[in-house]
Amino acid sequence: METTIKLLAVALLIILTAFFVASEFAIVKVRRSKLESKADAGDKNSRVALKLVDNLDDYLSACQLGITITALGLGWLGEPTLDHLLKPLIGEAGLPAAISHTISFAIAFSIITFLHVVLGELAPKTVAIQKAERITLLVSRPLIFFHKIMYPFIYVLNGSANALVRLFGIATARESGEVHSEEELRYILNQSFKQGEINRSEYKYVDRIFEFDNRMAKEIMVPRTEMAVLDTNDSMKNNIRIMKQNRYTRYPVIDGDKDNILGVIHMKEFFYDDIEKMGLLKPYIKPVVRVFENIAIQELLVRLQKERTHLAILIDEYGGTSGLVTIEDILEEIVGEIRDEYDHEEEREIKTLKNGHYLIDGKTSIQDINDYFNVEFENNEVDTISGWIYTRDIDAKEGTIVEENGIHFKIVDMHVGTIRKIEAWQ
């Protein structure tokens, strides 16, 4: 009878070990966002489970204390109990008492160790990792109860451990908090995409956001040479011809030169007035935001939102007009290219030709080239592939070929010194 009670106690200790091990891995692995969403929906168990996640340091200490107590209990009770059962069986072999005791001890120790490691630790750990949310919900109330009972011991042990850690200049778990680096978030994003948790579009959106902070306005601007502008010195007939030809919603207004921008006008103004008869642009000019061309695009987005405008003029270091950026240009850095009914003639910056080569727009940024071809072209002086080619060959012309990192770039279209199209191959 006594032996049976001891065996039941051993089984109970293994179960308790499994409980604490599963609790430890589950509360570390569980996603807080899932618990929060369920808690917001009124799930009481999720609200309780959030207490464990919010006080992870304390409850991990409770799990460790529980594992230690059960392990000591197994060592104190398990081996002697099995040894007591095995001795009579091994003694029947007629071996000397010392050898018989050693063999029974070794077998008892091996059995207890196997049960402790497999049933008490490895199996619960695997289940907890796979079913972290479910296990956390199941163990939360018992673990909180155990923490309350053992709080004095946990407080002393945890405080001693934290004091020792601080001696080495390391922050405690409570002080450091849980913060993921950009590299870790990228890895999580990549794994979620591979496992099918997010689709390709979601993956691309979030991935572009990581690049968003690294880009400057001049990398995405419409350059000065391609700006469609209205001139107060031109006839209204000519200005309206420019509007009809380009079909933009907003136009910068200049006074003879693109370095002298007076403001911007909105096409909706013409829905209310017969401007052809009036013959004046100035009454419709609104102030325009002017910023330095090296401003970060996320900072420019905030500025445009604050000013409640959709267009900004970029100024270079000499005070001249460098180009312009619209809200659409900025949003395209996150969601990809946005086309409206008047964008059908636009071409992709990089497209694949039938012969396996690539046709590249001369305005394509160096960063986009790096991302597309998985290379590391660097040049702090220029932002586009056409500018990069000029840094390699100042006399570049149609037919010029520049090679770098096994990629050949050939100029196939130029106009008045501007590289329009480039053919590339590897």
Image (spheres, rainbow, N blue to C red):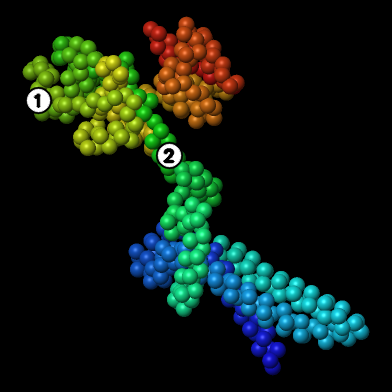
Q: Amino acid at mark 1?
A: Asp
At 56% across and 16% down in the image, what residue appears? 403
Farthest left residue in view: 278
* Residue receiving disc 2: 210
Distance between the alpha carbons at the discs numbered 2 and 1: 45 Å
Picture layout, residue 400 above or below residue 336: above
Q: Position of residue 302 (x, y in %)?
A: 27, 37
User: Of 180 and 58, which appears nearest the observer?
Assistant: 58
Q: Position of residue 195 (x, y in %)?
A: 54, 50
Determine the image quadrant of residue 356.
top right
Mark 2 or mark 1: which comes first in sequence? 2
* Residue receiving disc 1: 273
Determine the image quadrant of residue 205.
top left
Left or right: 274 as drawn, with respect to 204: left
Q: Amino acid at mark 2?
A: Phe
Q: Position of residue 131 (x, y in %)?
A: 54, 64
At 51% across and 23% down in the image, what residue appears? 377
Left or right: 342 as drawn, with respect to 15: left
Q: Position of residue 228 (x, y in %)?
A: 26, 18
At 90% across and 82% down in the image, what residue appears? 96
At 54% across and 30% down in the image, what residue appears? 374
Picture layout, residue 175 above or below residue 250: below
For numbered disc 2, what is the local secondary structure? helix
Figure quadrant of the C terminus: top right
Residue 134 visible (yes or no): no
User: Of 407 and 274, which appears nearest the observer?
Assistant: 407
Figure quadrant of the N terminus: bottom right
Farthest front residue in view: 167
